[in-house]
Amino acid sequence: MTEKLPDDLTQYFADLILQHTTDAILMTDKDQNVLWLNHAFEKLFGYRREDFAGIIPPELLYCAETDSDVARQVVEAIDDRRPVEVEMRNRCKSGQVIWVEKKLMPLFDAEGRHIHNMSISRDISGRKAMEAQATEMMDSEQQRQHERRLLSQISEWLYSAKSLDELLMVVKKSMETLLPEAEGQLYIYSNARDTLELAAQWGDGEPHAHIGAEDCWALRRGRAYSFGVKAIEFACGHVHDEDHPYFCLPIIAQGETIGLLHLCFSAFDRSIMPRNFIETFMQQRWEVGLLCAEQISLAVANVQLRQELQDQSLRDPLTNLWNRRWFLDASQKELNRARHQKLPMSLISLDVDHFKRFNDDHGHDAGDIVLREFGGLLASIFVGDFAPCRIGGEEFVVLCSGVSHDDAVQRAAAFLDKVAHIEVSHGGVRLPRITASAGVATYPEDGDEMLRLMKVADEALYAAKEQGRARVVSPRAVTPKKVA
């Protein structure tokens, strides 16, 4: 049976709409004094009509979170008697702040006079929360893409480094760019592997110059360590301040731990900042830190391999002195520098006396021992501006940068004197003492081309051999400098 409708349908349906709508409706006069509000308004905001006695709506609904520009737009629209639609934050009677979509409309009578204002508010807090979450996800993804691009660029620079010094420079700049919130240090194991030495640092921290492996939980446990967000954790011995979270990330090259990357977030004080905020932030940076440590580890391994291959190509494997290839390149560079700076440059050409006979009498193994001892003595005596090289067989040469002829002759004579005191044993038998001869040539007196200088030094060496060996000969000396 069909329900009978009242005669005044307009009023009937108007009452139904006002009863069931979820939109908060507020009616005011032209001076914003509240005249009427619906049940949905009371439910949404918690305010009743009597709460607005002597108070206009903005005084109760607006709060510190309300956008001032949006509030200004509303005021201007009311003053201009024109409708406006905005999204803004309002405060409920309970103190809760919610997002609302608000429509304000001026109402006019039949003669066009402004008599009332109507406000319709709809709660959009859920939608705003979803938008904020989506924005956060987009920002997070953009940040990750930015970090990936930076990591790609950093990787390219790291792998382009030809030396450890270049690598450390790239690491410092890269970490400042990729993790600007963190101050950090890169430690590398000393040759003795008893301590880690500070190799690079960035930020405002005051790190230790060296630390022990036992002072770091990451090195002791053999894996990356994060401090500052866990329920059970202990600070490393090399850390000054326990109030700030940090990472300790081992640097591993070719399966061996060679160093430590330490990152400290001193801007985040655990004693005053919300724990959940620090946890979220540190988790994001943890992933970046691990990637950085991995890239640095690969780059260090690459530099070590490159250095090893370079040493193999430029070092003599028996004596570990520079070889002929290195000497020819370095000597030409030093000669060019001597010309430009108007400095002297000398060459000392050396040869072990009677080496062929020594080999024939005692075997090649014994000969190798002699050459190794001879090269070791060269490396220990000629340091600094001197570069000893083995250029073939028992032939050696010392490149003397900025060294005068007389100084080179004196240094060569002193070295030959020490050669005579070398004691060599092979197979438990002490071998005969060895001697050596030397010739010296100097730029510019003996030539201004490297081939000419090498020829003069070799001729002086041959003269020393002919004059009885165990002596130094200079192309300008009246008598050779004989070793005592």
Image (tube, rainbow, N blue to C red):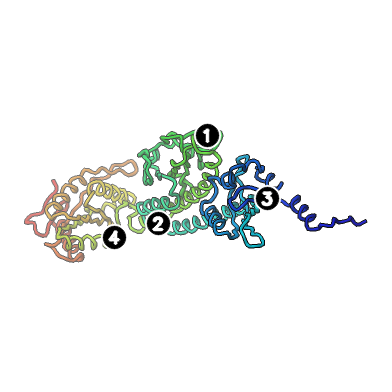
The reply to whether dot 3 and dot 2 touch (C-beta < 8 Å) is no
Disc 1 versus disc 2: distance between alpha carbons?
40 Å
Q: Measured along the vertical axis of the image, is residue 463 above or below residue 54? A: below
Relative to the observer, which residue lies in front, 420 or 105? 105
Residue type for callout 3? Ala
Q: Which amino acid type is marked by label 4?
A: Arg
Depth-wise, is mark 3 or mark 1 nearer the camera? Answer: 3
Q: In this view, does 420 lie to the left or right of 193?
A: left
On residue 306, which mark appears? Answer: 2
Tag 4 residue: 324
Visible residue check, residue 144: no
At numbered mark 4, what does the secondary structure look like: helix, strand or loop?
helix
Kind of residue at disc 2: Arg
Q: Which residue lies furthest to the front in this view?
A: 111
Q: Tell me the number on the disc at residue 233.
A: 1
Residue 23, percent from left and from top:
69, 52
Quarter of the image where one finds residue 107: bottom right
Question: Residue 389, labelled with which disc?
Answer: none
Q: Mark 3 = which residue?
A: 24
Residues under numbered marks 1 and 2 in contact, where contact means CB atoms less than 8 Å apart? no
In-image side of 414 versus 390 (left or right): left
Q: In this view, does 27 lie above or below 236?
A: below
Cα gap from disc 3 to disc 4, whole angstroms: 92 Å
